[in-house]
Amino acid sequence: MEREGWANPAIAKGYADGFDRATLVVAQRLSDAVSAGSNSTVLDLCTGHGVVAAELSARGASVTGLDFSAAMISLAQSAVPDASFVQGDAMSMDFADNSFDAVTIGFGVPHFPDPERGLAEAARVLRPGGRIAFSVWRGKGPDGAFGWLFDAVGRLGDPSVTLPFGPDAHMLVDRSAAEPMVTKAGFAEVQLIDVPSELYLQQPEDLFDAFDQVPFAQHHFWERSQSQNEMQFALIWRHVLAHKVLNAMAIFWSRLRPSSFRPFAADFCKLLVIMRVLRLAILSRFLDLGAA
Protein backbone atom coordinates (compact mmCIF):
# COMPACT_ATOMS: atom_id res chain seq x y z
CA MET A 1 0.00 0.00 0.00
CA GLU A 2 2.83 2.39 0.89
CA ARG A 3 4.71 1.78 -2.35
CA GLU A 4 1.60 2.11 -4.46
CA GLY A 5 0.46 5.28 -2.74
CA TRP A 6 3.74 7.20 -2.73
CA ALA A 7 4.48 6.22 -6.34
CA ASN A 8 1.53 8.38 -7.40
CA PRO A 9 2.88 11.85 -8.40
CA ALA A 10 -0.39 13.52 -7.38
CA ILE A 11 -0.23 12.04 -3.88
CA ALA A 12 3.46 12.96 -3.53
CA LYS A 13 2.72 16.53 -4.58
CA GLY A 14 -0.30 16.67 -2.28
CA TYR A 15 1.80 15.65 0.71
CA ALA A 16 4.48 18.19 -0.21
CA ASP A 17 1.89 20.96 -0.43
CA GLY A 18 -0.04 19.93 2.67
CA PHE A 19 2.63 19.05 5.22
CA ASP A 20 5.63 21.07 4.09
CA ARG A 21 5.33 23.81 6.72
CA ALA A 22 4.71 21.28 9.49
CA THR A 23 8.11 19.68 8.92
CA LEU A 24 10.36 22.75 8.53
CA VAL A 25 11.14 23.26 12.23
CA VAL A 26 11.86 19.56 12.62
CA ALA A 27 14.27 19.68 9.68
CA GLN A 28 16.21 22.40 11.47
CA ARG A 29 16.38 20.37 14.68
CA LEU A 30 17.54 17.24 12.85
CA SER A 31 20.30 19.26 11.18
CA ASP A 32 21.34 20.68 14.54
CA ALA A 33 21.41 17.21 16.10
CA VAL A 34 23.89 15.83 13.55
CA SER A 35 25.99 19.03 13.50
CA ALA A 36 25.55 19.43 9.75
CA GLY A 37 28.13 21.75 8.20
CA SER A 38 30.47 22.37 5.31
CA ASN A 39 32.77 19.48 6.18
CA SER A 40 30.09 16.83 6.68
CA THR A 41 28.59 14.19 4.40
CA VAL A 42 25.00 13.39 5.30
CA LEU A 43 22.63 10.67 4.13
CA ASP A 44 18.99 11.76 4.30
CA LEU A 45 16.91 8.59 4.36
CA CYS A 46 13.24 8.65 3.31
CA THR A 47 14.08 12.06 1.92
CA GLY A 48 10.59 12.61 0.50
CA HIS A 49 10.30 15.92 -1.30
CA GLY A 50 13.56 17.15 0.22
CA VAL A 51 12.63 19.25 3.27
CA VAL A 52 15.47 17.93 5.46
CA ALA A 53 17.85 17.69 2.51
CA ALA A 54 17.26 21.38 1.75
CA GLU A 55 18.13 22.39 5.32
CA LEU A 56 21.26 20.22 5.32
CA SER A 57 22.35 21.62 1.97
CA ALA A 58 21.76 25.20 3.13
CA ARG A 59 24.26 24.56 5.94
CA GLY A 60 26.90 23.48 3.43
CA ALA A 61 26.73 19.74 3.96
CA SER A 62 27.29 17.29 1.12
CA VAL A 63 23.86 15.61 0.95
CA THR A 64 22.68 12.32 -0.51
CA GLY A 65 18.95 11.68 -0.32
CA LEU A 66 17.38 8.24 -0.66
CA ASP A 67 13.72 7.33 -1.11
CA PHE A 68 11.80 4.42 -2.64
CA SER A 69 9.42 6.80 -4.44
CA ALA A 70 10.50 8.04 -7.85
CA ALA A 71 7.81 10.74 -7.61
CA MET A 72 9.31 12.06 -4.37
CA ILE A 73 12.85 11.89 -5.78
CA SER A 74 11.74 14.06 -8.69
CA LEU A 75 10.27 16.69 -6.33
CA ALA A 76 13.37 16.64 -4.13
CA GLN A 77 15.80 17.03 -7.04
CA SER A 78 13.91 20.08 -8.26
CA ALA A 79 13.80 21.58 -4.77
CA VAL A 80 17.44 20.89 -3.83
CA PRO A 81 19.58 20.87 -7.00
CA ASP A 82 22.85 20.86 -5.02
CA ALA A 83 22.07 17.49 -3.41
CA SER A 84 22.30 14.03 -4.93
CA PHE A 85 19.19 11.83 -4.86
CA VAL A 86 18.86 8.11 -5.49
CA GLN A 87 15.96 5.70 -5.52
CA GLY A 88 16.59 2.79 -3.19
CA ASP A 89 15.58 0.60 -0.26
CA ALA A 90 16.46 1.81 3.25
CA MET A 91 16.40 -1.81 4.44
CA SER A 92 19.23 -2.77 2.07
CA MET A 93 21.30 0.13 0.75
CA ASP A 94 23.99 -0.02 -1.91
CA PHE A 95 26.32 2.31 0.03
CA ALA A 96 29.56 0.92 1.42
CA ASP A 97 30.22 0.66 5.14
CA ASN A 98 31.39 3.87 6.85
CA SER A 99 30.24 6.12 4.00
CA PHE A 100 28.68 9.05 5.86
CA ASP A 101 29.31 11.33 8.81
CA ALA A 102 25.62 11.51 9.67
CA VAL A 103 22.19 10.09 8.83
CA THR A 104 18.90 11.96 9.08
CA ILE A 105 15.43 10.46 8.73
CA GLY A 106 12.55 12.91 8.70
CA PHE A 107 9.38 11.01 9.68
CA GLY A 108 10.56 7.95 7.77
CA VAL A 109 11.15 5.34 10.48
CA PRO A 110 7.40 4.74 11.03
CA HIS A 111 7.25 3.71 7.35
CA PHE A 112 10.03 1.11 7.73
CA PRO A 113 8.72 -2.44 7.24
CA ASP A 114 11.35 -3.47 9.83
CA PRO A 115 12.50 -0.56 12.06
CA GLU A 116 15.26 -2.56 13.76
CA ARG A 117 16.76 -3.60 10.45
CA GLY A 118 16.47 -0.08 9.04
CA LEU A 119 18.28 1.49 12.00
CA ALA A 120 20.98 -1.18 11.89
CA GLU A 121 21.47 -0.47 8.17
CA ALA A 122 21.81 3.24 8.96
CA ALA A 123 24.46 2.38 11.56
CA ARG A 124 26.35 0.31 8.99
CA VAL A 125 26.81 3.19 6.55
CA LEU A 126 27.89 5.61 9.30
CA ARG A 127 31.52 6.26 10.03
CA PRO A 128 32.73 5.58 13.61
CA GLY A 129 31.51 8.39 15.82
CA GLY A 130 28.81 9.36 13.32
CA ARG A 131 25.39 10.61 14.37
CA ILE A 132 21.83 9.72 13.48
CA ALA A 133 18.74 11.86 14.07
CA PHE A 134 15.21 10.85 13.16
CA SER A 135 11.75 12.22 13.83
CA VAL A 136 8.38 10.57 14.38
CA TRP A 137 4.96 12.14 14.70
CA ARG A 138 3.72 12.34 18.27
CA GLY A 139 0.75 10.25 17.18
CA LYS A 140 -2.50 9.54 18.96
CA GLY A 141 -2.22 12.06 21.79
CA PRO A 142 -5.25 14.22 22.63
CA ASP A 143 -3.78 17.54 21.50
CA GLY A 144 -3.10 18.73 17.98
CA ALA A 145 -4.04 17.70 14.48
CA PHE A 146 -3.21 13.99 14.70
CA GLY A 147 -5.10 13.60 17.97
CA TRP A 148 -8.12 15.26 16.38
CA LEU A 149 -7.80 13.02 13.34
CA PHE A 150 -7.72 9.76 15.30
CA ASP A 151 -10.58 10.97 17.50
CA ALA A 152 -12.69 11.59 14.38
CA VAL A 153 -11.78 8.18 12.97
CA GLY A 154 -12.67 6.47 16.23
CA ARG A 155 -16.10 8.08 16.31
CA LEU A 156 -16.99 8.12 12.62
CA GLY A 157 -15.07 5.30 11.00
CA ASP A 158 -15.96 1.70 10.38
CA PRO A 159 -13.73 -0.43 12.67
CA SER A 160 -14.05 -3.40 10.33
CA VAL A 161 -11.76 -1.66 7.80
CA THR A 162 -8.15 -2.21 8.79
CA LEU A 163 -4.72 -1.41 7.40
CA PRO A 164 -2.35 -4.11 6.10
CA PHE A 165 -0.16 -5.58 8.82
CA GLY A 166 2.88 -3.50 9.73
CA PRO A 167 4.86 -2.19 12.72
CA ASP A 168 3.11 0.23 15.09
CA ALA A 169 3.80 3.66 13.61
CA HIS A 170 3.72 5.27 17.06
CA MET A 171 5.84 2.88 19.09
CA LEU A 172 9.01 5.01 18.96
CA VAL A 173 7.22 7.92 20.64
CA ASP A 174 7.67 5.89 23.83
CA ARG A 175 11.21 6.13 25.20
CA SER A 176 10.97 2.65 26.72
CA ALA A 177 10.50 1.25 23.20
CA ALA A 178 12.73 3.66 21.27
CA GLU A 179 15.90 3.60 23.36
CA PRO A 180 16.42 -0.21 23.40
CA MET A 181 15.82 -0.40 19.65
CA VAL A 182 18.25 2.41 18.86
CA THR A 183 20.86 1.02 21.27
CA LYS A 184 20.54 -2.47 19.78
CA ALA A 185 21.24 -0.97 16.35
CA GLY A 186 24.63 0.19 17.65
CA PHE A 187 24.01 3.75 18.86
CA ALA A 188 24.81 5.31 22.24
CA GLU A 189 23.95 8.51 24.13
CA VAL A 190 20.33 8.38 23.00
CA GLN A 191 18.25 11.56 23.44
CA LEU A 192 14.52 12.04 22.88
CA ILE A 193 13.07 15.54 22.68
CA ASP A 194 9.67 17.01 21.85
CA VAL A 195 9.62 19.52 18.99
CA PRO A 196 6.54 21.67 18.36
CA SER A 197 5.26 21.48 14.79
CA GLU A 198 2.90 23.94 13.11
CA LEU A 199 0.60 23.40 10.14
CA TYR A 200 -0.66 26.66 8.65
CA LEU A 201 -4.26 26.80 7.39
CA GLN A 202 -6.12 29.49 5.50
CA GLN A 203 -9.43 28.31 6.94
CA PRO A 204 -10.43 25.60 9.47
CA GLU A 205 -11.71 23.19 6.83
CA ASP A 206 -8.26 23.06 5.23
CA LEU A 207 -7.14 20.56 7.87
CA PHE A 208 -9.39 17.97 6.22
CA ASP A 209 -7.81 18.69 2.83
CA ALA A 210 -4.29 18.31 4.24
CA PHE A 211 -5.03 14.81 5.56
CA ASP A 212 -7.02 13.88 2.47
CA GLN A 213 -3.92 14.34 0.29
CA VAL A 214 -1.92 11.43 1.73
CA PRO A 215 -2.24 7.70 0.96
CA PHE A 216 -3.08 6.46 4.42
CA ALA A 217 -6.02 8.88 4.53
CA GLN A 218 -7.40 7.71 1.19
CA HIS A 219 -7.16 4.07 2.22
CA HIS A 220 -8.15 4.43 5.84
CA PHE A 221 -11.05 6.85 5.46
CA TRP A 222 -12.56 6.67 2.01
CA GLU A 223 -12.83 2.90 2.16
CA ARG A 224 -14.70 3.40 5.42
CA SER A 225 -17.31 5.46 3.58
CA GLN A 226 -18.40 2.71 1.21
CA SER A 227 -21.47 1.96 3.31
CA GLN A 228 -22.67 5.57 3.27
CA ASN A 229 -22.93 8.51 0.91
CA GLU A 230 -19.34 9.63 0.25
CA MET A 231 -20.23 13.32 0.05
CA GLN A 232 -22.03 13.19 3.39
CA PHE A 233 -19.13 11.34 5.00
CA ALA A 234 -16.64 13.91 3.71
CA LEU A 235 -18.77 16.80 4.96
CA ILE A 236 -19.10 15.28 8.43
CA TRP A 237 -15.38 14.55 8.73
CA ARG A 238 -14.50 18.01 7.39
CA HIS A 239 -16.82 19.60 9.94
CA VAL A 240 -15.43 17.61 12.88
CA LEU A 241 -11.85 18.68 12.13
CA ALA A 242 -12.88 22.29 11.49
CA HIS A 243 -14.69 22.30 14.82
CA LYS A 244 -11.47 21.23 16.59
CA VAL A 245 -9.50 23.99 14.87
CA LEU A 246 -12.06 26.61 15.92
CA ASN A 247 -11.97 25.30 19.50
CA ALA A 248 -8.18 25.63 19.57
CA MET A 249 -8.43 29.19 18.24
CA ALA A 250 -10.93 30.07 20.97
CA ILE A 251 -8.62 28.69 23.68
CA PHE A 252 -5.66 30.59 22.20
CA TRP A 253 -7.52 33.91 22.19
CA SER A 254 -8.88 33.37 25.71
CA ARG A 255 -5.32 32.96 27.04
CA LEU A 256 -3.85 36.04 25.39
CA ARG A 257 -1.77 38.44 27.44
CA PRO A 258 -1.84 41.25 28.46
CA SER A 259 -5.19 41.20 30.23
CA SER A 260 -6.40 44.12 28.09
CA PHE A 261 -7.01 41.59 25.33
CA ARG A 262 -9.51 39.69 27.50
CA PRO A 263 -12.70 41.50 26.44
CA PHE A 264 -11.87 40.99 22.77
CA ALA A 265 -11.01 37.34 23.40
CA ALA A 266 -14.35 36.75 25.13
CA ASP A 267 -16.26 38.32 22.22
CA PHE A 268 -14.21 36.27 19.77
CA CYS A 269 -15.04 33.05 21.62
CA LYS A 270 -18.75 33.93 21.52
CA LEU A 271 -18.44 34.52 17.79
CA LEU A 272 -16.82 31.12 17.33
CA VAL A 273 -19.61 29.46 19.28
CA ILE A 274 -22.21 31.16 17.06
CA MET A 275 -20.26 30.08 13.97
CA ARG A 276 -20.19 26.48 15.16
CA VAL A 277 -23.92 26.46 15.90
CA LEU A 278 -24.69 27.90 12.47
CA ARG A 279 -22.32 25.44 10.83
CA LEU A 280 -23.99 22.52 12.58
CA ALA A 281 -27.46 23.75 11.63
CA ILE A 282 -26.54 24.21 7.98
CA LEU A 283 -24.76 20.87 7.85
CA SER A 284 -27.67 19.04 9.45
CA ARG A 285 -30.13 20.58 7.00
CA PHE A 286 -27.89 19.73 4.05
CA LEU A 287 -27.54 16.12 5.16
CA ASP A 288 -31.30 15.80 5.61
CA LEU A 289 -31.79 16.96 2.03
CA GLY A 290 -29.08 14.63 0.80
CA ALA A 291 -30.60 11.64 2.55
CA ALA A 292 -33.99 12.45 1.08
Image (cartoon, rainbow, N blue to C red):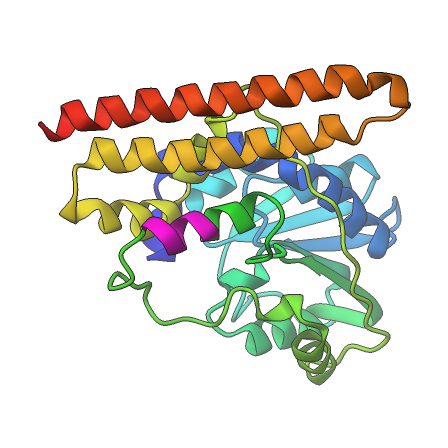
Q: How many marks?
A: 0
- Tell whether 135 sits left or right of 284: right
Q: Give how far across and how far down residue 164 sits, in percent.
A: 32, 67
Seen from the viewer's position, the closer of residues 139 and 129 is 139
Q: Main secondary structure of the magenta part?
A: helix
Q: Give how far across and how far down residue 144 sits, in percent.
A: 61, 45
Q: Tell me if residue 129 comes above or below residue 149 in the rendering.
A: below
Q: Give how far across and how far down residue 219 sits, in percent.
A: 30, 50
Q: Give how far across and how far down residue 166 sits, in percent.
A: 41, 71
Seen from the viewer's position, the closer of residues 5 and 152 is 152
Q: Tell me if residue 226 comes above or below residue 139 in the rendering.
A: above
Q: Residue at x 63, y 72 (%)?
A: 119
Pick the quarter of the image with the N terminus.
bottom left
Bounds of the magenta segment:
151-156
Q: Residue at x 87, y 26 (%)?
A: 257
- Residue, far left: 292
Q: Tell me if residue 254 comes above or below residue 225 in the rendering.
A: above
Q: Quadrant of residue 267?
A: top right
Pick the quarter of the image with the C terminus.
top left
The answer to whether residue 9 of the structure is visible from this angle is no
Q: Residue at x 72, y 46 (%)?
A: 26
Seen from the viewer's position, the closer of residues 110 and 140 is 140
Q: Quadrant of residue 21?
A: top right
Q: Residue at x 89, y 23 (%)?
A: 259
The answer to whether residue 201 of the structure is visible from this angle is yes
Magenta segment includes 131: no
- Tell whether 220 sits left or right of 232: right
